[in-house]
Amino acid sequence: MSLSTQPLTDHPTPDSVVAWQPDGPVSRDRFLADASHLAGLLPAGGHILNICQNRYHFLVGLGAAIVSGRVSLLPSTLTPEAIARLRSETPDLFCLHDGHLDTIDLPGLAFPTPLPLAGRNLPVPKIPVDQVVAHVYTSGSTGIPLTHRKTWGALVINALSEAERLGARGHALVGTVPPQHMYGFESTVLISLHGGAAAWSGRPFYPADITAALAAVPPPRALVTTPFHLRTLLDAGVEVPPMDFILSATAPLSEELAARAESTLGAPLHEIYGCTETGQLASRRSTATRAWHLLGEVRLSPAGDGHVASGGHVEGIVPINDVVELTDERHFLLHGRNADLVNIAGKRTSLAWLNQQLAGLPGVRDGIFFMPDEEPDDHVTRLCACVVAPDHTARSLLNALRTRIDPVFLPRPLIFTDTLPRNAASKLPRASLLALLPRKDKAGE
């Protein structure tokens, strides 16, 4: 029989460490007191936009929203257009911030100064499993974001499944991804509520900041990051404190980078696969196997020309926008997103595979293939690529790519830049890439 409620956190004792701040550990009692205090200060309204940059502040804001029956909105972008759309859909929306309200056109509440801790062994609130606690968003076919509602019970199962797979209980987690992004939300925030982990409050970006954050928390510890941050960390050549595992997501990870990371950092590297609609679905040890292992009770099943996810924390039956190949009931191979597949002159490949080949070239610090807007019917649409490779010329890089990919997929144009326009989650919005294209798309070698 399923439980009708789940606790706000499963940390077992008042002194259990829920998070780490620069001044030390944050106990379960401290977290519960901070969440209760903030809940009493929240303005009227059932929807909250939590943009706190401090990960512990975000965690407290989430807890305060949950115990007071409010819904946290987690949009993929905070552009004025996106904020206006959220406000029209949820007129009672307000913004919780910790000094970074910027130009967001919403009523704001600054994160409060904590009160002195009074009492001990504070009661842990029980939350109905069917309570909707978060809205996450994906792009619809019309370009208007679609809302996906996440219930507390499903999120708890989600976090526990990941924690069990990774052996994360008792670990301090340093995350380079924001808590508002689905990956950061699941793998640093939820897992610190249910899963026995404890998130570092900061969000380090540069290699020196990552190493300092890892040094600030005790072992066992782990790094929750992206291929971009991982490559930048390795290229910096800095001394990194020992870790128990590394977790990567948001973009495909090349075999070369996975092997280099494990060899240099001395820790196993795991990847998480999932999508906003379903949450995380599977994991793998990247250097050991190509096959993905489904989490918990999640299932993938054939449906039409694709597959659907169900079971475990997946709410309903959800189509998967990726090309997968089931190898048995619990494992599958991932061949790329449907939208990722390209067909040029009758030859097929995926952008993910091309990106892996590009990233694996010596001297390439960052890079991405993408399709430009469609050409007229009497022209062949050619792939584009943006790359950070200061030691290469266009000719030398194209010659290196020829040894790895079919010439029909060589990029035209190949654009060199000092940095790629990555967002806070290290992803590359298509609009930002298109803005880098020259007015006339002609490749020059």
Image (spheres, grey):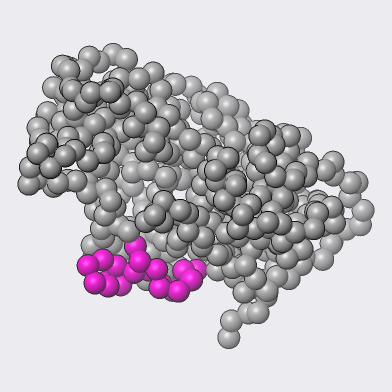
Q: Position of residue 139 (x, y in %)?
A: 43, 53
Q: Is residue 26 left or right of residue 195?
A: right
Residue that appears at 45% across and 62% down: 278
Q: Position of residue 399 (x, y in %)?
A: 13, 22
Q: Position of residue 251 (x, y in %)?
A: 37, 43
**Is residue 242 at least partly visible in the picture?**
yes
Q: Nearer the viewer, residue 347 or 281?
A: 347
Q: Is residue 29 left or right of residue 435?
A: right
- State yes or no: residue 309 in magenta: yes
Q: Nearer the viewer, residue 327 or 107?
A: 107
Farthest-out residue, bottom:
1
Q: Nearer the viewer, residue 406 or 198?
A: 406
Residue that appears at 24% across and 72% down: 304
**Is residue 227 at least partly visible in the picture?**
no
Residue that appears at 20% across and 17% down: 394
* Quadrant position of residue 133: bottom right
- State yes or no: residue 432 in magenta: no
Residue that appears at 73% across and 71% down: 126
Quarter of the image that includes the C terminus: top left
The magenta segment is 300-320
Q: Position of residue 285 (x, y in %)?
A: 36, 50
Quarter of the image that includes the N terminus: bottom right
